[in-house]
Amino acid sequence: MRFMAAYDMMETARNTNAWLGATARTMASYPAFALASSPGFRMLAAWGEVTERTFQRMIVKPDWNIPPIPGEDGRDHQVDVETVVERPFGDLIRFTVQGRAPMQRRIMLVAPMSGHYATLLRSTVVSLLPDADVFVTDWHNARDIPVSAGKFDVEDYTLYLVEFMKELGPDTNVIAVCQPAPLTLAATALLAEEHPEAQPATLTLIGGPIDPDAAATDVTDFGRRVTMGQLEQSMIQRVGFKYQGAGRMVYPGLLQLSSFMSMNAETHATAMWNQILAVANGTAADHDKHNKFYDEYLAVMDMPAEFYLSTVERIFKGLEVAQNRFSVGGKTVDIGKITNVAVKTVEGGKDDISAPGQCVAALDLLTGLPDEKKASYLEPNAGHYGIFAGGSWRRNIRPLVLDFIDANSGKPDRPARRTKLQAV
């Protein structure tokens, strides 16, 4: 499958389905059919609308679309997105609230590079902005990165995080969500040893596979069953000539999406059918619950092949972080070197991606960190998404994370301003 033809075939299939949906919607919406007694035309138009939107969203990066933030002056303040550090494979961006003075809390959200854009953390950003200045690692779609930019694997990812944290300085509070948790832990350890003056004040790891062997899931079982050769042959393709990254080896977003959806195929099929009925009945809306979820879920990005393969080989199969054997540039990174960065882990009791036990394993690796600087929290009824963006995050986890940041910021006079968020 490591050929451009395979990549282009998937893109052709996606493009064809989007075209079929647009054609069906247009044809079934002719005014001449309005007087027809059969509801078939209305159903065909609805099917076309949902199908076109579904397949078109797969190649579009969602907008951040952050709403205005209420200020203490009683006014709503617009939010701008600014690039702080620009790099070929990802940028460090900042959400600047116009007319607001710098906040005492500075939070760097480390977004996953796991198939979806950093906009997956939009609701997380919205929930934190009233009480903090927020920065996010905004990873780029590998299909748009020229081959001349070189490789990007787990070591490069770690060095990017080191650079971003050095840019922000020691007053930063880092929150790593899911996949980047082990690499963020390694980056913090690297800073502790080589640039201790640039270490963050706190590190919060949410639902990350620090030790994949601590609790089995479908993800860890898959990584154990499949050999690296099988993985490379079945998952890796070359970007076609349509994009700037033509020739780059990637794990295509469309292939990732097919894997995501196959895990809950019946649920997704039911959701799509219900949406077709809603469109046909006139009860659907452009930003209803279905579209808000699937506009983000279906927007996938290609991953650099070397990053995907090295993640499976070194984090899941080799357990290099879990066994404190991870190395960057031939030098072993000792997690025990972290001695004064407060670390908190957050897990979901119903997380089927990073099951309880995988993330909290980080605390055992922090042999040089006093117990009073370690914390953990388990949200019993939360799934994977809920612990960083759902109701569990808004109601329970977010306040605890902010309290943890305040308690370990080194600034006891920090005002405990906290914005209450309505539970949804």
Image (cartoon, rainbow, N blue to C red):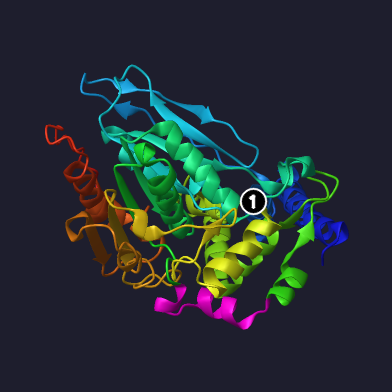
Task: Characterize the magenta stretch by its predominant secondary structure.
Answer: helix
Residue appearing at x 65%, y 50% in the figure: 152
Residue 78 belongs to the span the image colors magenta: no
Residue appearing at x 65%, y 66% in the figure: 258
Relative placement, left or right, of 103 versus 287 is: left
In this picture, which residue range is highlighted in magenta? 212-227
Relative placement, left or right, of 127 versus 38 is: left
Which residue is tagged 1? Answer: 301
Which residue appears farthest toward the bottom when viewing the image?
225
Quadrant in which the N terminus appears? bottom right
Residue 263 vs 379, above or below: the answer is: below
* Residue 115 in view in this figure: no
Q: Position of residue 103 (x, y in %)?
A: 27, 27
Relative placement, left or right, of 2 versus 83 is: right
Residue appearing at x 51%, y 62% in the figure: 326
Residue 133 vs 269, above or below: the answer is: above
Three-letter residue code for mark 1: Met
Residue appearing at x 28%, y 33% in the figure: 130
